[in-house]
């Protein structure tokens, strides 16, 4: 069974940095795009950053210049380096992957369980 397992969330002071990771596993996979979304209390889940398998990236305007998304294709892992964090970055961060389970021949979106990022002094 395909799983996305996230790690690296936590509490950080404003201006600090944090890196979250997400690894896809559980079958023989072909991974297309991977990305991070976030959901703050009372708000809808929104895209933070995404990266395609050709390395092209997309960022929400609110994180451009502060966050960097990257991936390790050999490990089916995506990272989000977050710098200059602000209190408004506080949210649950969810990993998303568009991937194909080659054993089942099924391609669809998968989601991680979410990891809390809190920016507070």
Image (spheres, rainbow, N blue to C red):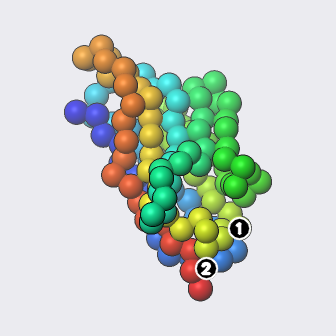
Q: Which residue is mark 2?
A: 13
Q: Residue at x 47, y 70 (%)?
A: 10
x and y, in percent, of residue 101 in the image: 32, 22
User: Furthest residue to the right?
Assistant: 65
Q: In the picture, which quadrant includes the N terminus?
A: top left
Mark found first going from the N terminus, 2 or 1: 2
Q: Which residue is mark 1?
A: 84
Q: Quadrant of residue 67?
A: bottom right
When the figure is inspected, residue 31 is found, relative to residue 84, above or below; the finding is above
Front-most of 13 and 45? 45
Left or right: where 68 falls relative to 4: right
Left or right: where 16 falls relative to 5: right
Q: Name the mark on residue 58.
A: none
Q: Residue at x 65, y 30 (%)?
A: 55
When the figure is inspected, residue 27 is found, relative to residue 111, above or below; the finding is above
Q: Residue at x 62, y 55 (%)?
A: 81
Element carrying mark 2: loop
Left or right: where 11 falls relative to 54: left
Element carrying mark 1: loop
């Amino acid at each position: 069974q395909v799983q996305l397992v996230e790690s690296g969330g936590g509490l950080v002071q404003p201006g600090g940095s944090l890196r979250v990771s997400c690894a896809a596993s559980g079958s023989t996979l072909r991974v297309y795009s991977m990305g991070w979304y976030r959901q703050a209390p009372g708000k809808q889940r929104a895209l933070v950053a995404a990266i395609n398998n050709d390395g092209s990236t997309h960022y929400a305007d609110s994180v451009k210049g502060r966050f960097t998304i990257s991936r390790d294709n050999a490990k089916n892992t995506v990272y989000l380096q977050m710098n200059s964090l602000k209190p408004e970055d506080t949210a649950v961060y969810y990993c998303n992957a568009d991937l194909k389970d080659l054993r089942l021949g099924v391609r669809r979106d998968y989601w991680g369980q979410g990891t809390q990022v809190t920016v507070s002094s």
